[in-house]
């Protein structure tokens, strides 16, 4: 852990990006949203942020990334392989690990792709609700060259109200490739405003 922290601090010392983070909750477990997710460089920034903070980080990746020759490296970095044919199984697996006592932050890019999409994927929301986990809003903002942890939220079950808070935070965050940014919106949101 100390080596990772030193590597991260060395990176921030020479990087054109600035790290700005709000404190993490004391839970030692939660969902870390990585957004806007518009480039593969987001992954390196996420590792540098997590290693600097000393958090235990896990992330989801498609199964093909966990085959030779890079599979061992991906697992060592905290990766959990995902079978995309059964996305609900992933939610159950992660919730099961946390209920069994594992403590980690799961980094999720709800946009699901580095391309512009119509909606965010809702797995982060379901996991946060089912395991009663805080959601840390991690961000990348090219316009200010800043990245880090924003506020920590609890998902209430009022999907639209929760997503309104998330949208408000990400409203001015551009991502590395701003044209590929996806508006934070879940397919499950009701079409009428919450009361």
Image: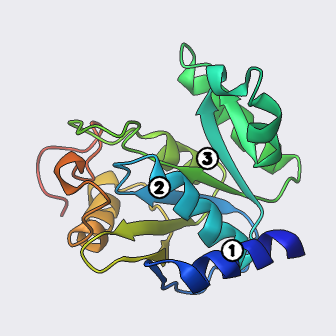
195 vs 180, nearest the viewer? 180
In terms of sequence position, does the residue under pointer 1 or pointer 2 come before the other? 1
Q: Nearer the viewer, residue 46 or 94?
A: 46
Residue 42 is labelled as 2
User: Can you give x and y, in whole percent of width and height, for residue 184 in the image?
Assistant: 27, 53
- Residue at 42% of width from left, 40% of height from top? 122
Look at 61% across and 34% down and name the residue there: 61
Where residue 6 sits, quadrant-wise, is: bottom right
As measured in the structure, the alpha-carbon distance from the residue carrying label 1 to the one carrying label 2 is 14 Å
Query: In the picture, which quadrant includes the N terminus?
Result: bottom right
Q: With respect to residue 58, does 49 lie above or below? A: below
> Where residue 103 appears, x then y in whole percent?
82, 59
Left/right of residue 124 with respect to residue 2 in the rendered view: left
Callout 2 secondary element: helix
In this rendering, would 192 be left or right of 124? left
Cβ atoms at labels 2 and 3 below 8 Å apart: no
For the residue labelled by badge 3, is the local secondary structure a helix, a strand or a loop?
helix
Q: Which quadrant of the figure has residue 134?
A: bottom right
Compared with 36, 20 (above or below) is below
Front residue (pair 125, 35):
35
Identify the residue under disc 1. 8
Residue drawn at (20%, 44%) of the image: 190
Q: Quadrant of residue 173?
A: bottom left
For the point 28% across and 37% down, the residue is: 115
The Cα atoms of the two marked residues, 3 and 1, are separated by: 32 Å
- Sooner in the amino-acid sequence: mark 2 or mark 3: 2
| Residue at disc 1, secondary structure | helix
Picture disc at residue 130? 3
Real-space Cα separation, disc 2 to disc 3, in angstroms: 27 Å
């Amino acid at each position: 852990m100390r080596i990772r922290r030193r590597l991260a601090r060395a990176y921030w010392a020479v990087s054109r990006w600035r790290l700005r983070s709000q404190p993490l909750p004391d839970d030692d477990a939660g969902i870390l949203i990585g957004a806007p997710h518009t480039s593969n460089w987001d992954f390196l920034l996420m590792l540098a942020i997590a290693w600097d903070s000393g958090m235990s980080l896990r992330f989801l990746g498609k199964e093909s990334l966990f085959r030779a020759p890079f599979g061992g490296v991906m697992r060592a970095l905290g990766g959990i392989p995902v079978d995309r044919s059964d996305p609900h199984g992933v939610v159950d697996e992660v919730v099961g690990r946390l209920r069994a006592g594992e403590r980690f932050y799961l980094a999720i890019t709800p946009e699901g792709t580095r391309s512009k999409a119509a909606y965010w994927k809702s797995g982060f929301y379901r996991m946060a609700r089912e395991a009663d986990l805080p959601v840390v809003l991690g961000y990348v903002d090219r316009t200010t060259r800043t990245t880090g942890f924003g506020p920590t939220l609890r998902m209430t079950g009022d999907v639209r109200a929760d997503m309104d808070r998330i949208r408000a935070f990400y409203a001015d965050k551009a991502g590395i490739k701003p044209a590929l940014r996806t508006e934070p919106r879940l397919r499950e949101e009701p079409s009428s405003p919450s009361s």
